[in-house]
Image: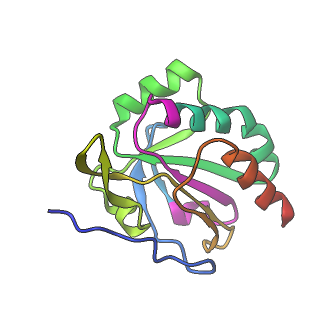
Amino acid sequence: MPTATEISLKIGDKAPEFNLPSSTGKNIVLKDLKGKNVVLYFYPKDDTPGCTKEACDFRDTIRVFEKENVVILGVSFDDLKSHEKFIQKYKLPLTLLFDENKEVASAYGVYKLKSFMGKSYWGIERATFWIDSQGKIKQIWPKVKVEGHIEEVLAAIRKT
């Protein structure tokens, strides 16, 4: 039985390392991204309404993020085949990561006991982390509401 995790990370903490398979065909390792800002967003499931809206919002603003030296990485428990279909269907220029063992979601405190229509299950609670170029947590957005979220992230990045 899984145990609940909480976002115990704080602004200024070193971001938990990860090495995950990605939609690019290569593993993505956080330490290899040193020197870049990383927006690491956790989402529950490929090709569902809220997750699709969030991914498409990132898609539509990716050039702006790139100008700010930001790499956007999406993380879910969906496998690479699911990510591939999702990317193709919505023409997503994003790198999606496969957290098969739920270790990264747990390390970031977003693996939660959730409930839907009276049933409880374990899954990802939507959250976004901005990791600065030195690998430290710069900002955390827990329990993300999709509408307006990308604008909020971008505004925070542009302030620096």
Rendered image quadrant of residue 91: top right
In the rendered image, the quadrant that contains the C terminus is: bottom right
Name the residue rendered at 76%, 54% in the picture.
Answer: 69
62, 22: nearer the viewer: 62
- The tally of labels here is 0
Name the residue rendered at 46%, 77% in the picture.
Answer: 8
In the rendered image, the quadrant that contains the N terminus is: bottom left
Q: Is residue 24 above or below residue 114?
A: above
Q: Is residue 67 above or below residue 61?
A: below
Q: Is residue 22 left or right of residue 102?
A: right
Most extreme residue toward the left is 1
Counting from the top left corner in percent of width and height, residue 16 is at 46, 71
Colour option used: rainbow
Q: Is residue 98 left or right of residue 137?
A: left
Counting from the top left corner in percent of width and height, residue 99 is at 35, 51
Most extreme residue toward the front is 118
Q: Is residue 2 left or right of residue 117?
A: left
Name the residue rendered at 32%, 53% in the picture.
Answer: 114
The answer to whether residue 34 is magenta is: yes
Most extreme residue toward the right is 159
Most extreme residue toward the top is 89
- Over which residues does the magenta segment extend? 30-51
The answer to whether residue 46 is magenta is: yes
Q: Is residue 109 left or right of residue 35?
A: left
Q: Is residue 52 above or below residue 158?
A: above
Counting from the top left corner in percent of width and height, residue 5 is at 34, 69
Counting from the top left corner in percent of width and height, residue 143 is at 51, 57
Rendered image quadrant of residue 34: bottom right
Name the residue rendered at 35%, 59% in the picture.
Answer: 111
Rendered image quadrant of residue 35: bottom right
